[in-house]
Structure formats: structure tokens, C-alpha cells
Image (tube, rainbow, N blue to C red):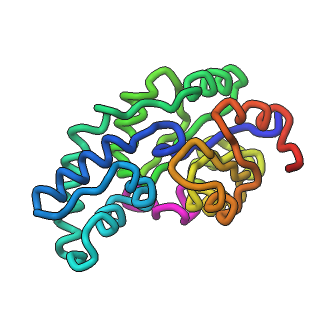
Amino acid sequence: MRFDAVIFDLDGTLLDTLGDIAAAMNAVLAAHGHPAHPAAAYKHMIGDGVGMLVRRALPEGAREQARIAALETEMRETYGRAYAVRTRPYEGIPDMLDALAARGLALAVLSNKPDALTRACVEALLPRWRFAAVVGEKAGVPPKPDPAGARAIVAAVAAAPERVLYVGDSGVDMETAVAAGLFPAGALWGFRSRAELERGGARVLLARPADVLPLVDTGPRPR
């Protein structure tokens, strides 16, 4: 096999979290008299941490730092109470994870979601699989695209960076993989566009989760 380990982004890659994130953020906004957003609009707001999500969701004239900090705290609490109402693994993810586990690859998750919520989502919604590492936003781990979290996972699974596949749905994910020396594969079933993934440095684009398997077994084919 070309790879010894696979690191996955969480939101938009393993789990379709859009509905629960949108519902929680809209509830926080409404509580402060701010307009809500359609769920689809959140595809372009999430992925860079809760603070940035709040900043993007607020009207431009209401983005004072104190307000952002207060609503960030509320968002963490609101979402933490309802992170698994609508959220489910994408179609094909369970079969793909089963196949990777059967091949003996180390599996890991790296997210910009708060660490406790990242772990809670994995435990609640992906309980069948053993992940060698599950890492979210926390003290000492800068958010992606900083490669520190990815490098820590690579060290934890004792793999050479070039033998680690990174699967994510955003340009930030691809930039993270490139910076850490991993192989960046863009998930087209997620929240962001093909163009963004290509700009971020994706070396291959995956149309569905099952496309991970031939990549692991034989390496990338010329595009």
C-alpha cells in the first residue's frame, strides 16, 4: 500500500454537521436580535474555528471583538448541547472506514472544531472505529492550516509524512497537508468547491468516500 495512515478532517469530510451548526448559530444570533442565515450559507463560514464562524455570521456592523467573544462562548454551549441532532456520517463513510481498518491503516481525525466537541462527535457518531488520534482546537495546537496538529498526529502513529494521506473538504485542509508534508486529497462531497481544493494544493480530488480505497491501494492515477 502507498500509505500507512489516513488523517481525516471532521466537518464536511466524515460528518455532515451543517444542520446542527446552522441551527445552533442561528439560535445564538436570534437571541441577540441578529438575522439568521440559510443552512447552506454556513458551508462558507465554518472550518476556521468557532470564533471565525461567529465573526462571519454576525452582521458587518456588529463585529466588535467583545461581542464576538461573548457569542463564541454562547455558541460553544448551544452547539455542545445539540451537536448530534441532525449530524450523520456521509453516505459511504462507514464502508470506507471499515475497508481502511481491514487494511490495517492507522486512522486519525484533525479538526478546527473545539477539542472536546471533536471528541464527542467522534465518540457519538463514529463509535465503531478505533482512531489512533482525535485532535481538535485546544491550547497548544494552533488551528489549521498551521501544520502542528498534523505533525503531532504523524508522530503519534509513527509514520513517515509522505506515507500519510490527508482527506479534507476545504482549502485550509489542503494547505495543512501540504505544510506538513502529507498527501492532500480533496473531498468533493463536503462543504467547499473543487476550485478551492485545487487552490489549496489538492493532488487528487475524490468524488465519493469509496474513492479513497484505490488511492490507498495503488496510489494516484494521472489526471
Q: Residue sitting at 65 percent across and 35 percent down?
A: 208
Tell me where residue 171 sits by quadrant.
Answer: bottom right
Front-most of residues 167 and 90:
90
**Above or below: residue 16 compared with residue 50:** above
**What residue is at 36 percent from the left and 66 percent from the top?**
52
The image shows residue 11 at horizontal and vertical percentages of 46, 45
Q: Nearer the viewer, residue 172 or 109?
A: 172
What residue range appears in magenta? 137-149
Q: Is residue 134 above or below residue 175?
A: above
182 left or right of 29? right
Count the labels in the image: 0
Residue 156 falls in which quadrant of the image?
Answer: top right
Q: Residue at x 56, y 39 (%)?
A: 108
Seen in the image, is 82 located left or right of residue 107?
Answer: left
Asked if residue 155 lies left or right of residue 214, the reply is: left
Is 88 drawn above or below residue 158 in the view shown? above
**In the rendering, at what x and y percent does residue 22 appear?**
31, 48
Would residue 196 be seen by someone viewing this image from the given angle?
yes
Query: Which residue appears at 26% of the width and 45% of the height?
Result: 23
Q: What secondary structure is the stretch in magenta mostly built from?
A: loop
Q: Residue 147 falls in which quadrant of the image?
A: bottom right
Q: Position of residue 86 (x, y in %)?
A: 33, 33
Determine the residue located farthest toward the right in the rendered image: 222
The answer to if 95 sits in the magenta stretch is: no
Q: Position of residue 219 (x, y in %)?
A: 84, 40
Q: Quadrant of the N terminus?
A: top right
Judge whether residue 64 can be spotted in this image. no
Is 139 within the magenta?
yes
